Image (spheres, rainbow, N blue to C red):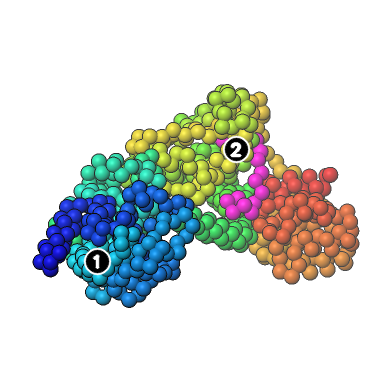
Amino acid sequence: MGTIDHELQELKIKNKLSRVFLTMPDEKLYPEVLKIVLASCRSQFGIFGYFDGQGAFVIPAITTTDYWNQCRMADKEIIFEKADFCGAWKKAFAGKKSLYVNNGPFHVPAGHISVDNTMVSPIIFRGKVISAIHVANKSGGYDEEDMRLLASLTDYLAPVLAARLERDRTEKELKVSEELHRITVENIADPVFITDAEGNFIHVYGNVGQVLGYSAAEIQAMGNISVLAGSNLFDANQLNREREIRNLDSILLDKNGNSHYFLTNIKQVAIDNGAILFTFHEITDKKMAEEAKAKLERKLRQSQKMEAIGTLAGGIAHDFNNILGVIIGYTDMAMEDAPPDSGCARDLEHVLKAGYKAKDLVQQILAFSRQAKVKRFLLQPQPIIKETLKMLRSSIPTTIDIQQDIDPECGAIHADPTQIHQILLNLCTNAYHAMEEQGGILRVELKRTAVNAADFPEYPALKTGAYVELVVRDTGTGIDPASKNRIFDPYFTTKGTGKGTGLGLAIVHGIIRDYGGAIRFSSKPGTGTDFHLFFPALPGQVLPSDEGTEALPAGTEQILFVDDEEMIADMGRNMLARLGYSVTTRDNGFAALETFSNNPDRFDLVITDQTMPGMTGAELAGAMLRLRPAIPIILCTGYSSIISEEKAKAIGIREFLMKPIVKKDIARLIRKVLDS
């Protein structure tokens, strides 16, 4: 065949190869190219492959003739690692040139088809071996013309194959990138949204379902992000000016209406005509932890405040009770000297009542700070309720009308009057705050009622029977439904700063439970609140009659009266002298002990203050009891963190009297001690 014929024949082959590259996909391209080359080189079988990024030879096309099927290799891999190259392959790839070998048959693995001759041509693009074609078993062997033809064909294939491989590599990288992007987006822990410039959803990413309970489709169906996050999520002007807003606090509601807290980043991105990227990083657990920590800190501060109040209360009780003792004692004696029914007597009576109210006020402070022992006794609640409402009237503005319906025959209860006062004060103060802006009606009712324990399952210890019911109604703002289950929790309050500690209703609830009673409330926002408190009534109990002008018990015994306050000592001497007693006073424990030591049998009774400089009343009593074990002693105190009534009696003190000293109380107590 002449040179022109060879060139024409070669041109036809190249044209066929061009059509293959132009018209066929990858899965058909390699086998079709190999088929054309095998026919051109008159070979029985061959392989056509390319080199991957790691240098391995990947073979997508291999002869599938019956001849190849004769191969009995157990493993017909189509990827050969670089380390496995040998023989003609190794020489051709290393030398970057075509070669043929006819001195077969060659050594092949067991079961492999026999190879009598072979020809290899690497495909080189820009100095790099990118592919190779290998043919074998041509009848009669290969020659220089065969090698030239194959080299010419592989040179022709080099640029188009390189372009095809580059495209394939790019497409593969793109698929990997897209898959990586898909995996990344699907595994983002937080919601990520892309919207247009108006906030309409374009894409919804992230773990929206687990965080908010919505599917991506449900979020898309909302249309605009304002439906999910509210219209005030961010400042549009700020975003346009700064192009990004970071660490914005936001709240999203999940499908069940629960709030989730997020740190939100909002950024303008260059997509289409402009879009906005929203990333929501959930901080609900952190927020809850911070709120819990803040709540604990508030409790700690409140506890410290209560401790400080208690310390202050003790000091107030000691000093103020001494002052009250003088006021009450001398007023009481002045009333004895004033003409009955005179203006002076009436004025002194008002002073005495004010003194008693101040005495109760000190006890309230001590009770609130838990430094005074609660003492319950049989009482009629009506006077306490009326007195408390009278006091409230002066502190609550006239825009609030205070109404009362007090049944005088409602019965007696077993309670501490200070706690009854405290209950009503707390409830009425709450009612006042609920009506502070608009005004309204505060109504207090006290009546007798019957209670069926079955109607109060939340109070399993409640007994069926007669109760005194205290009702406090207001026409204020009402209680938010979300707060109804928490109003009795300690430190829970919906009031503004400075208007409440969250302790009032907790204290009320605790007191009423201790009394064996119950408390219920009803409220609707905007229509007011009703509180109903049920105190166990004590029917048939006879209350002590008003002592009025009943004569006080008197005596002629010798009494040693000890108090470091000169006014209290003088008042005590005058008060007891009016009752007929012979009184010796001392202003400190050392002087009193010296007087007593000189003649222990001289005195029939010792009355001593507890808090004195140098030697306390308890220490003085102990020293006197060692000198005369049977000496009757009454210990007086306004407040002491050292001695209690139980401790006092344990060391031999007969009685324990709380200051301020009231004439009728000390008169009866003296006779009780001396006559026993």
Q: Which mark is residue 40?
A: none
Q: Position of residue 364 (x, y in %)?
A: 57, 50
Q: Which mark is residue 513?
A: 2
Q: Position of residue 96 (x, y in %)?
A: 30, 74
Residue 582 seen in render: no
Q: Nearer the viewer, residue 13 or 54?
A: 13
Local packing at callout 1 (Cα closer than 10 Å; few below 14, some 14-19, many 20+) is: some
Local packing at callout 2 (Cα closer than 10 Å; few below 14, some 14-19, many 20+) is: some
* 550 relative position to 594: left or right: left
Q: Which mark is residue 146?
A: 1
Q: Position of residue 452 (x, y in %)?
A: 57, 23
Q: Nearer the viewer, residue 2 or 256?
A: 2
Q: How many marks?
A: 2
Q: Which amino acid, by three-letter code, is at mark 1?
A: Asp
Q: Quadrant of the N terminus?
A: bottom left
* 101 relative position to 202: left or right: right
What secondary structure is found at the residue carrying circle 1? helix
Q: Is residue 448 magenta?
A: no
Q: Earlier in the sequence, mark 1 or mark 2?
A: 1
Q: Which amino acid, by three-letter code, is at mark 2?
A: Arg
Q: Quadrant of the C terminus?
A: top right
- Image point (55%, 45%), residue name: 507
- Image point (67%, 60%), residue name: 568
Marks 1 and 2, how far apart at CA: 109 Å
Q: Nearer the viewer, mark 1 or mark 2?
A: 1
What secondary structure is found at the residue carrying circle 2? helix
Q: Is residue 368 magenta?
A: yes
Question: Residue 7, located in which quarter of the rendered image?
Answer: bottom left
- Image point (26%, 75%), residue name: 127
The span shown in magenta is: 367-381
Residue 336 seen in render: yes
* 627 relative position to 216: left or right: right
